[in-house]
Image: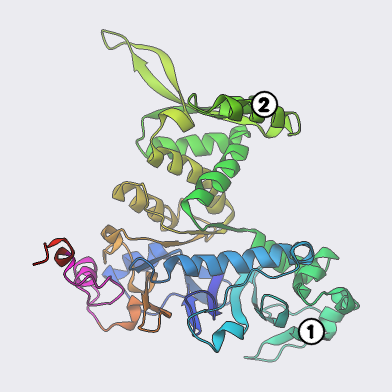
Amino acid sequence: MLIEFSIANFRSFRDEVTFSMVASPLKTNGGQLDDRNCFAAPGSINLLSSAAIYGANASGKSNFVAAFDFMTRFVRRSHDNTERTGGIEVEPFRLNTETETEPSYFEVLFIVDDEHFRYGFEATSESVVTEWLHILPTNPKPGLVEIAGQEVKLFERDGNEIRLDQSFEEEAGGLEARTRPNALFLSVGAQFNGETAQKVLGWFRSIGIATSLGHLDFGMKMFTERMLSDRDTADEIVDLIKKMDLGIEAIQIERNAPATDLLPDYAPKELREAMAAYQENLNREEQVAVRTVHRKTGDSGQPVEPALFDLDEHESEGTRKLLAMAGPLVDTLKFGDILVIDELDARLHPLLTKEIVGLFGDPEKNPNGAQLVFTTQDTNLLDPCFLRRDQIWFTEKDRQGASHLYSLVEFKIDENAPFERDYIQGRYGAIPYLGDVRQLFLEKD
């Protein structure tokens, strides 16, 4: 479960910003949204099931998701990835001479196995500058001293110096020398089967992130295809798709389809031949073709043999996106994980977007506290009867090109205020300043 995520000096975020999934003490609509959009988490804390981030184009929304994606990937792969590339793919704020050479900062506060962890690091493209892992245990392990109201420092790193708590020494001691300057100590500890390190790494692995449309279409599509290979999860995906009113009755997976079958008919002959040759070096079990089943009727309206549509050739872009998302949505809701999506509403009807967000606010569909964080331009969601104020966030750039992040809960407004109208009118900021665009098309004298 995600509690907070903080970043600084990454892409357009110069100063530190903190995104929080902690539910504020406000009461909305007689408590109806409080029951649906919040849930009780271990440690006497209430968390939000979803949060939306709004803002003008180039205001920093995608950079926020990219920061989450970078931290997640770096934790997962740093023990071997940086040795291969030789550098860390961090991007500091480049519109200031001071920040260009300063490290980027990342920290996340989360819950796993009823324990609260705080993990973070600072890094440049060459090395990890600082790193830390703290815990506020509810059930301390033997040897772990609990100080009321304070966090226990499992380890802290300053350059090449790594200081370990006694409890962490037992599982990660001796690994300091194995940690390269451009690798995270946490990742190294997990690689060598450290219990706590593996637990934290497991939490990062449970996060699904789509940083762009291309990433969403490919990565999540492949994930959905794997789920469709299992009958139980396939039925769950089909049930979800049916409820979205896309006219799809079923989904067929053709395993071991030749690679050329995955190309459209208009693909050049040379490409099809190259794919056929490449097929010999691929694991054939991973090659699949997805086809959707649609109801078909005869002249008198009686049902006949269904029609099969190739997903990539005959379905709309919106349908392809929704199907790509279906697997991660089902999996996230089932296991209580976290899903982060950039531009959730792109290519989707507003009602479909609202339906997806609503799944996370439905205790029956989301019994395990799954969370959805997404960026969007869909103002239809700005409804006080649908989202709480603390679920609505904004990004805005200042005159120095630095992005700022803030929540609607920071504004003193009535709980039933017209969020959508006030946002479009600029009351909350985070909208583009267009000037008089029409002047660009006027003929010059």
The three-letter amino acid code for the residue at tag 2 is Ala
Kindly report the distance in space between the C-alpha atoms of the residues bearing marks 1 and 2: 58 Å
* Quarter containing the C terminus: bottom left
Left/right of residue 29 with respect to residue 18 in the rendered view = left
Q: Answer few, some or many: residues within 10 Å of disc 1's Cα (few below 14, many 20 plus, some between 14 and 19).
A: some
- Assess whether residue 431 is covered by the magenta stretch: yes
Describe the element under mark 2 as helix, strand or loop: helix
Left/right of residue 219 with respect to residue 38 in the rendered view = right
Left/right of residue 106 with respect to residue 320 in the rendered view = right
**Residue 371 locus on image (x, y percent):** 50, 61
Q: Is residue 164 visible?
A: no
- Assess whether residue 347 is covered by the magenta stretch: no
Image quarter of residue 438: bottom left
Q: Nearer the viewer, residue 428 or 417?
A: 428
Q: Which residue occupies the extreme right position in the image?
A: 174
Q: Which residue is mark 1?
A: 144
Q: Which residue is mark 2?
A: 276
Query: Going from the N terminus, do you reach mark 1 or mark 2 first?
Result: 1
Most common secondary structure along the magenta stretch: loop
Give, as a single range, the part of the protein colored magenta: 413-437
* Quarter containing the N terminus: bottom right
Q: Which residue occupies the extreme top position in the image?
A: 299
